[in-house]
Image: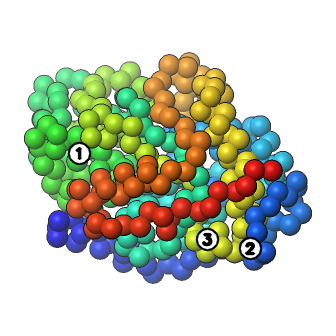
């Protein structure tokens, strides 16, 4: 456990140097605005990763839900939650789709104070898989990952936890410093082909793309101990939520409509995916999707914290309640 905590000192050193920044101030009550009147801030930049988890933001844009609330929302595509967190802390992003693992680690490290304003995505079978070259006879199951180089999109995030947990069930202990290689998801296929890495951890559309290129599935990283695992939520800084309560409430109301649509109608998600990802319509119609959450659950967040404690990534007693923003009242 001492090694795992020490491996995260870089997060503290980089992020703690940044200053929380947000804009505006306003009355502490969050009420329906019916337009831009009364909002502390109307133009928001939201960091997302180009994977299905972020579909509700695109749905809210397409359906005019943000506009109805007086918000002008723009998407910024990021490499991953761990990489986007410094931008959120620095005020370059007003909100982001944050994977809970990276978020909890940043909070625990003192890199900033954050609020989850809405839940977004929960894993389902084959959403996040470990793949290897199809002709690599040495890697066929998670038990074969011992000593192998494994690509994840960012370190100290959901990918590293998922691979570590999957390998542990197979009797393998991953050497975090020596085995994990951080790289953008679009670059992993080429790295696998050239032998730069032995295995990759990917989500759609990269599962389908790499399968077409000849890669094979080694393991579903969201089976076993991480079955139905909470993946990501919509995150703002504590400072932003306290200084912009009406803006936050407007964002939550718009997003709530989109999350409900995503949860109830797969076709709406399929229509949204090609607009911010490289998932085409044909692929969107057949890929495995996770569950789009319609409420923020303390129990789900606590499961993340308990799992991170189990793997020595944060100490016991992590306060998930401190991360939960109050839900906006219905109009």
Q: Is residue 193 visible?
A: no
Counting from the top left corner in percent of width and height, residue 233 is at 52, 51
Q: Which residue is mark 2?
A: 28
- Identify the image quadrant of residue 241: bottom right
Residue at (55%, 41%) from the top-left corner? 293
- Disc nearer the start of the sequence (1/2): 2
Q: On the rendered image, what quadrant is the N terminus found in?
A: bottom left
Counting from the top left corner in percent of width and height, residue 221 is at 30, 37
Q: Which residue is mark 1?
A: 165
Mark 2 residue element = loop
Residue at (68%, 53%) from the top-left corner? 252
Q: Is residue 142 left or right of residue 231?
A: left
Examine the rendered structure and indicate whether residue 281 appears above or below residue 102: above
- Which of pointers 1 and 3 indicates the residue nearer the eye? 1
Counting from the top left corner in percent of width and height, residue 184 is at 41, 48
Q: Is residue 293 left or right of residue 319?
A: right
Examine the rendered structure and indicate whether residue 270 appears above or below residue 82: above
**Crowd around label 1: few <14 · some 14–19 · many ≥20 (10 Å):** many
Q: Which residue is mark 3?
A: 91
Q: Is residue 198 visible?
A: yes
């Amino acid at each position: 456990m001492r090694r795992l905590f020490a491996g995260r000192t870089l997060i503290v050193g980089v992020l703690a140097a940044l200053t929380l920044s947000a804009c505006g101030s306003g009355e502490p009550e969050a009420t329906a605005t019916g337009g831009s009147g009364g909002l502390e801030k109307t133009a928001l930049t939201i960091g997302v990763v180009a994977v299905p988890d972020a579909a509700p933001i695109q749905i809210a844009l397409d359906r005019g839900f943000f506009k109805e609330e007086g918000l002008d929302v723009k998407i910024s595509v990021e490499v991953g939650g761990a990489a986007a967190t410094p931008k959120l802390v620095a005020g370059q992003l007003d909100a982001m789709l944050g994977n809970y693992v990276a978020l909890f680690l940043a909070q625990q490290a003192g890199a900033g104070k954050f609020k989850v304003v809405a839940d977004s995505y929960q894993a389902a079978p084959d959403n996040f898989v470990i793949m290897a070259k199809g002709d690599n006879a040495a890697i066929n199951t998670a038990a074969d990952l011992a000593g192998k180089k494994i690509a994840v999109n960012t370190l100290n995030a959901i990918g590293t936890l998922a691979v570590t947990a999957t390998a542990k069930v197979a009797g393998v202990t991953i050497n975090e410093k020596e085995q994990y290689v951080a790289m953008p998801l679009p670059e992993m296929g080429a790295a696998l082909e050239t032998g730069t890495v032995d295995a990759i951890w990917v989500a759609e559309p990269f599962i389908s793309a790499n399968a077409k290129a000849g890669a094979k599935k080694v393991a579903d990283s969201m089976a076993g101990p991480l079955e139905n695992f909470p993946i990501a939520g919509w995150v703002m800084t504590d400072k932003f939520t306290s200084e912009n309560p009406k803006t936050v409430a407007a964002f939550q109301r718009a997003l709530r409509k989109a999350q409900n649509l995503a949860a109830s109608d797969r076709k709406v998600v399929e229509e949204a995916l090609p607009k911010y990802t490289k998932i085409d319509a044909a692929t969107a119609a057949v890929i495995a999707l996770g569950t789009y959450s319609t409420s923020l659950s303390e129990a789900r967040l606590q499961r993340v914290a308990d799992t991170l404690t189990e793997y020595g990534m944060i100490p016991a007693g992590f306060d998930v309640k401190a991360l939960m923003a109050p839900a906006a009242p219905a109009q």
